[in-house]
Amino acid sequence: MEPVIATTNKAVAGIDDPELSLRWSARLSLTTRILAVNILAIALLAGSLFYLDNYRDELTDERLNQAQLQTQIISTALDLQTPENRKDLIVDFAQHLESRLRLYDKSGAKIVDSFELAEPTYRFRDPNTQTWQKGVARKLDQSIEFIVLSKPITAFTEPNNDVASSWPEVRLLSTDQAPNGAVRYAPDRTPVIIAASHVPSSNHVLLLTSNARDITRIVRAERSNVVLVIFLTAIVSVLLSLFLARTIVRPIRKLARAAIRVRLGRAPEITIPRMPGRRDEIGQLARALADMSGALRYRIDATEAFAADVSHEIKNPLASLRSALESLDRVDDQDLRRQLLDVANDDVRRIDRLINDISEASRVDAELARTKFEKVDIGKMLDQLLSAREQRDTNESVKIAFARPGRDVATVMGDDDRLERVFSNILDNAVSFSPTGGLIEILATPDADKVVIQISDQGPGVAEEQRKNIFNRFHSDRPEGEAFGRHSGLGLAIAKTIIEGHEGTIEAIDRPDHEQGACFEIRLPKASI
C-alpha cells in the first residue's frame, strides 16, 4: 500500500503557509485530534467533580452554623427550666435533632447525656464491615480532597474521660457566651458536627454532637450522577468522533492514495473518486481533484501526441535534406547540384519554420496561464494589424475590407499580442486560399455578452467534414500549385489554443451571404464596462 503522505515537511518547508502549519500537534493524525478535542470537553465536564467538594464544604459549614444556633437556643431554653425538667427537655431536643446532647456543670463534670437517658439517635459505622463500594467512595473522597487541597479534617474520637475539658470546642468557648463548633470525620469519613454553648445563668456547658451522614450521602449521590453523565457523554463523544473520523478522515485518505497513484503513474488510467453524493467541502475537494487529474491526464496525452506529431513532421524535411546532401557527392552536373542545394535550403527553412511554430505552440498554454488580461479593443487592434500588413505587403494581390466598429463597442479582456497572433494566422490562411484579386471581409460586432468576429474569404471553402480537423496540429490541406512545406500546419491549432485560453470559441462556418468561400467565426466574452 502506498504511503498516505507523498512528501515530508522538510521537502516543502520553504513554501509552507504559516497560517496552515501545525506546531505541537503536527505529528498527530486527524482522528487523534478529533478524539482529543472531544475528550478535552469531557475533561472539563469532569471538573464538576471537584466543584462537589466545595459543595460539601458549604453544606458542612451551613450545618455547623445551624448546630451552633441550636445549642444556643437549647441553652436558653434550659436556663428557663428547673433542674428536674432539664433532662426531659434535653432528651426531647436530642430525639428531634437526631443528635447527642451532653450537659456539663461548671466544674466540667458531665451531669446529663441523652444517649444514657434514651436510645442513641445515631451510631458510627465500622468501615471494616461495609461493602467494597463504600470503600471505593471513601478513597475517591480522599483523592478529590488531595487534588483540590482541601483543609485537613481530624478524626473524631470519644474521650476516655468524658469531661468538659476533654473537648477542644469547650475549651475554646469565648467569654462573650458565643457558641463554638467544629467538624471532624467519623471512622467511615462522614462528618461529625460538634457545637458547644454556655448555659447563661448556671454557667453550665451544653455540647451537641451529630453524625451528618446525609451530607456525605447527598454529595456521593450527586457525584454518581455526574460520573454517569460523564460516562454517557464520553461514549457519545467517542462515537461522534469515530463518525467524524469515518466521514472526514477516510475519504481524505482515499483521495490522498489516489493522488499518490496518479503521481507515481503506475496504472495507465487512474480515477479519482468524485463522491457525487457528498455536497460538503470534502465532496468539493474530491471533484476538484478529479477534474485536476482529468486535466492533467489530458495534458499528458496531448503532450505525448504532440511529441509524436513533431517527430513525424520533422522527419520528412530531415530525410529530404539528408538525401540532397548525400547526392551532392555523386553529382557532377552543376545545374543538378544547384537544384540539390536549393532543395536543401528549402528543407532547412522548413525545419526552421517548424521549430519556431512548435516552440510557440508548446509554450502558448503556459504563457496564457501567467498573463494578466487587460481590456482590448478588437476594432482598434484589427485596424492596426491591417495597416501593418499593408506596409509589409503581406496581403499579396488580395484586398481586405474591414467594417470597423465604434470605439469600445467590441472590447474583450485578453492579451493583445496573443489575440493579434490569432487574427494574423487566420488572415495568412485566408490570403493563401484566396484567388488573385479576391476579397477578405472582416466583421466585428457585439452580441449580448459576446464579441463576434467573422473573417470570410473567397477561396474554395472548408468541407463540412474537415471543419474540426483543420484545427488539429500539423493538419495541412493546401491549395493546388502552392509550394510544399511553406506552412507547418500549426497556425490554426495555435489560434484555437489562444482563443480557448481566453474562454472563447473558434470554428469554421459557411459564409453568411452563402457565397463560395470559408468563414472563421470567433466568439470572445465581452469585457464589462
Image (cartoon, rainbow, N blue to C red):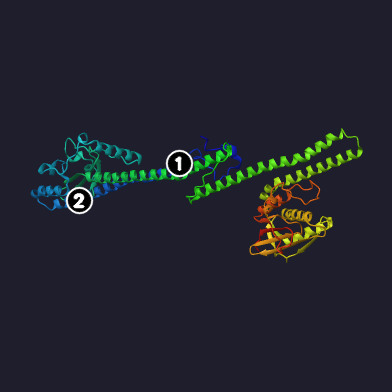
Placement of the C terminus among the 4 image quadrants: bottom right
Choose top left, top right, bottom left or bottom right for residue 132: top left
Gap between marks 2 and 1 measured at Cα: 60 Å
Give 219 or 367, whichever is nearer the viewer. Answer: 367
Q: Residues within 10 Å of mark 2 (few under 14, many from 20)?
A: some
Q: Which residue is mark 2?
A: 70
Q: Nearer the viewer, residue 83 or 190?
A: 190
Q: Position of residue 443 (x, y in %)?
A: 73, 63
**Position above or below: 321 against 285:** above
- Return the residue found at the far left: 84
Residue 177 seen in this snapshot? no
Single out the mark in the foreground, 2 or 1.
1
Closer-to-camera residue (131/371): 371
Residue at the far bottom: name it.
406
Q: Amino acid at mark 2?
A: Gln
Horizontal side of residue 257 vs 76, given as left or right = right
In x, y percent, where is residue 448? 64, 64
Tell me the crowding category of disc 1: few under 14, some 14 to 19, or many 20 or more residues within 10 angstroms, Cα based: some
Percent coordinates x, y for residue 46 in the rendering: 36, 44
In depth, the one of 73 and 216 nearer the eye is 216
Residue at x 66%, y 41% (from the top left corner): 304
| Residue occupied by mark 1 | 31
Relative to 12, is 476 on the left or the right?
right
Counting from the top left corner in percent of width and height, residue 100 is at: 16, 44
Q: Which residue is at a point 79% across and 47% down the rendered structure image?
A: 486
Could you say whether the residue bearing mark 1 is in a helix, strand or loop?
A: helix
